[in-house]
Amino acid sequence: MKRTPLDVHLNLNVRGMPNSATVAIHQRCQQLRREGHDVIGLGLGQSPFPVPEPVVEALRRHAAEKDYLPVRGLPALREAVAAYHARVDGVERDAEDVLIGPGSKELMFLLQLVYYGDLVIPTPAWVSYAPQARIIGRRVQLIHTREDDGWQLSADGLARLCREDTGRPRIVVLNYPSNPTGGTYRLEELRALARAAREHRVVLLSDEIYGPLHHRGQHVSIARFYPEGTIVSSGLSKWCGAGGWRLGTFSFPSALRWLLDAMASAASETFTSTSAPIQYAAVTAFNGSDVIDDYLRRARRALRAIGHGLVGDLRAAGLACADPLGGFYLFPDFSAHAERLAARGIHGSRQLAERILEDIEVGLLPGQEFGRPDEELLLRIAYVDFDGAGAQAAFGDSPRSAAEAIARARRVAPRLFEAVERLSTWLAAGPSPD
């Protein structure tokens, strides 16, 4: 019997929407490896470090926890998160100001769902901010930052956008240390941004998931300077190496309690509550300990050394690339090779990433995915393809010199340096003969 297929009726906001770029490149690299290709995947920003052992042990102890927890989160965890931000960031919040979710990504989606206003995104920006807004039907306003300014949003740029339509409700996203650039803000820049945000009464969503991975341990939250209007986003995925555990946190000022309440109501009708064993384990993570402090010191040393070593090799290949200050990302600019790339038929970041994957089996993401014009020859490198536990062991103490740091980096992350060597050789080779 012939069956007539059902008609396709998709929400227009998601019709034609592809998978997240980071997820897509990761899946593609995995498939190529299964087919026998020697692919070095630098697309998905998954922490290479193991979850700290005290946190793993806490999960073991609480593996039998099976009850639904409160929508807003386990009270002990909310207290631990509030105490963490007070201890680490100097931002005073209490347990009633904290909302727990199954990943900060989910909480960002709920925030846009319940808040009626525009989403303002400085670019380059993480790949999922704008697609989430479009799914919901929110207006997205992009502010293109400049490489000469370290890809940072300026207070003048924010004020200029706000003056175009004074009083319009807006959420402004800050993400630092940055995905995709590895950059961060200086103290005076944060103060100026806070003044502009206060003057124009915008809500700041400060995505500080990489804050504890500031390479010198000197992250400063903008919530110190604009406490009444800043939501601080954090979680376990980056600094605690637990991306697959899916636990995120939002810390609100009391003046935005109405927003937290609305998000909790929406959460009660969607995910209900976050995994109970994971929440119990997260209490140990946010309470901190000497073991966790040492874990972070070693991770920071490794990331700083590897990042600086890779930047040196990228520059030697004729690429412009800023030194990373936090996290595990680089954002090299290939424009110095524009003519040579054009001779190969490569005119944009998407073509560039595709050809690099095809020709030398290195998986990178194009700058276009981060909100930049495609004609800019920008790519993002997630430098995470190394043994995190081995790197932490190798960086148990501070290297005595920059040369020693980079030598250690080359030993613990050979695949990363091989990837840059492949890039360098490919760039030097020029177009293939007819």
Image (spheres, grey):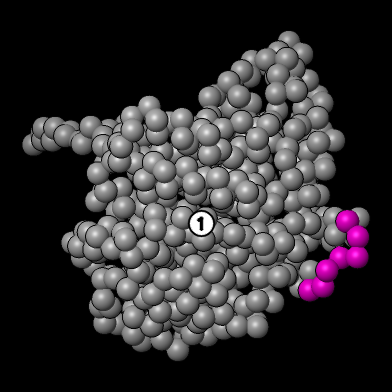
Q: Quadrant of residue 135?
A: top left
Query: Split into 4 quadrants, where in the image is the C terminus?
Result: top right
Magenta-drawn segment: 396-402
Q: Residue at x 75, y 23 (%)?
A: 336
Residue at disc 1, secondary structure:
loop
Query: Split into 4 quadrants, where in the image is the N terminus?
Result: top left
User: Residue 255 versus residue 75: which sits nearer the camera?
Assistant: 255
Which residue, given by chain and number where applicable, does mark 1 sit on?
225
User: Residue 212 versus residue 362: which sits nearer the camera?
Assistant: 212
Q: Is residue 345 shown above or below 12?
A: above
Q: Residue at x 30, y 41 (%)?
A: 169
Q: Is residue 150 left or right of residue 222?
A: right
Q: Which percent across, then down, holds residue 255?
A: 32, 61
For the residue carrying disc 1, how many other residues have a C-alpha within 10 Å: few (<14), some (14-19), or many (20+)?
A: some
Q: Quadrant of residue 153?
A: top right
Say which amino acid is labelled 1: Phe
Q: Is residue 224 shown above or below 118?
A: below
Q: Which percent across, then down, holds residue 307?
A: 74, 51
Q: Is residue 395 shown above or below 117?
A: below
Q: Is residue 198 left or right of residue 151?
A: left
**Residue furthest bottom in the image:** 61
Name the chief secondary structure element in magenta: loop
Q: Is residue 398 magenta?
A: yes
Q: Residue at x 47, y 77 (%)?
A: 83
Q: Residue at x 26, y 48 (%)?
A: 115
Q: Which percent across, then down, holds residue 48?
A: 63, 62
Q: Is residue 289 shown above or below 116?
A: below
**Residue furthest top in the image:** 434
Q: Quadrant of residue 163?
A: top left
Q: Is residue 80 magenta?
A: no
